[in-house]
Image (cartoon, grey):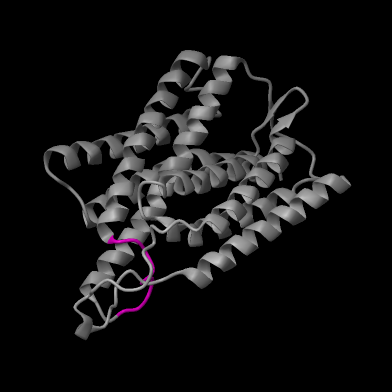
Amino acid sequence: MSDLTTLLLIAAVFAYLAGFIRLWRQRAPLIDPSPASGLTLTGVSSHQIDSLFFLISGAAVVLHSLLLSQSLFVPGGLNLSLVTVSNVVALVMLGAVLVCNVRLPVHNLNIFLLPIALFNLTSLALAADRPVTVSAALSDAEISHVILSISAYAVLMTAALQSLLLAFQERRLKHPTAHNLAFLPALETIERLLLAMLWIGTGLLTLSIVTGFIFLEDMFAQHVVHHTILTTCSWLVYSGFLIGHHFVGWRGITAIRWNLAAFGFLMLGYLGSKFVIEYLLQS
């Protein structure tokens, strides 16, 4: 690792930690959960944009991206290792929520995403001296398929995390004396962001599957057939929920279950197969 790379790494880690500490210290409950309060609004709204926090987090994302580019773009093609792709996903997740905060009060969700990005950055640094074993020389069409696939995975992972937060919010409404996660956005806000992410993610996943059949030679080759089947199952579950939401009005716990089930298929289809190929079969 060169001196410049080391400096970028230290600066990125410092920026992530500084952003998390600032956000954690300035978090404020959106409601007073005491029974006597009647769940009235209190504290600072999570939609108030902290310019310094966004400057720090934006710097962290830029520094992380520069470090990631050194690992992603290698001589002869793209490094699509598990660690590298996980870092791409973490950056897309963090960037998506930072952008969404312009329109929706989802500022405090970064409390969960900043540690995820920092963890992935650390794993990238630890794998820096490891020989690149997965490198693909791709055409422009194949690169577009890869970008669509990773983007879809990142957006749908964000939706899966929102489902967990939605479950916590549902529980908190049923147990108003609980103070856990009182700083989270309102239930309706999380649901709106969740549905937006599901529509966007499912659209990207659809394009990913279509471009895969068009641009890749054999989507049912032995080493990718399980990935194709599991990804298709995930798409069917996501599509089934969105159809049910549109025509029947599914939401709440139903949305949580369908979303987590669909993402489970997607995670097994990609990360599971990557882990088996890169670590178990080569051990």
| Residue 213, percent from left and from top | 44, 17
Q: Residue at x 41, y 36 (%)?
A: 230
Question: Image height check: is 56 above or below 283?
Answer: below
Question: Image height check: is 35 above or below 126?
Answer: below
Left or right? Give the position of 64 relative to 8: left
* Magenta segment includes 71: no
Visible in this render: residue 282? Answer: no
* Magenta highlight: main SS: loop
Viewer-side residue, 23 vs 176:
23
| Residue 245, percent from left and from top | 19, 42
Q: Residue at x 25, y 56 (%)?
A: 188
Viewer-side residue, 83 vs 3:
3
| Residue 265, percent from left and from top | 40, 42
Query: Quarter of the image holding residue 231?
Result: top left
Q: Residue at x 62, y 15 (%)?
A: 139
Left or right? Give the position of 200 relative to 138: left
Visible in this render: residue 161? Answer: yes
Left or right? Give the position of 269 relative to 91: left
Which region of the structure is painted magenta?
178-186
Viewer-side residue, 51 vs 223:
51
Left or right? Give the position of 238 relative to 153: left
Query: Quarter of the image holding residue 243?
Result: top left
Q: Farthest residue in the bottom direction?
A: 36
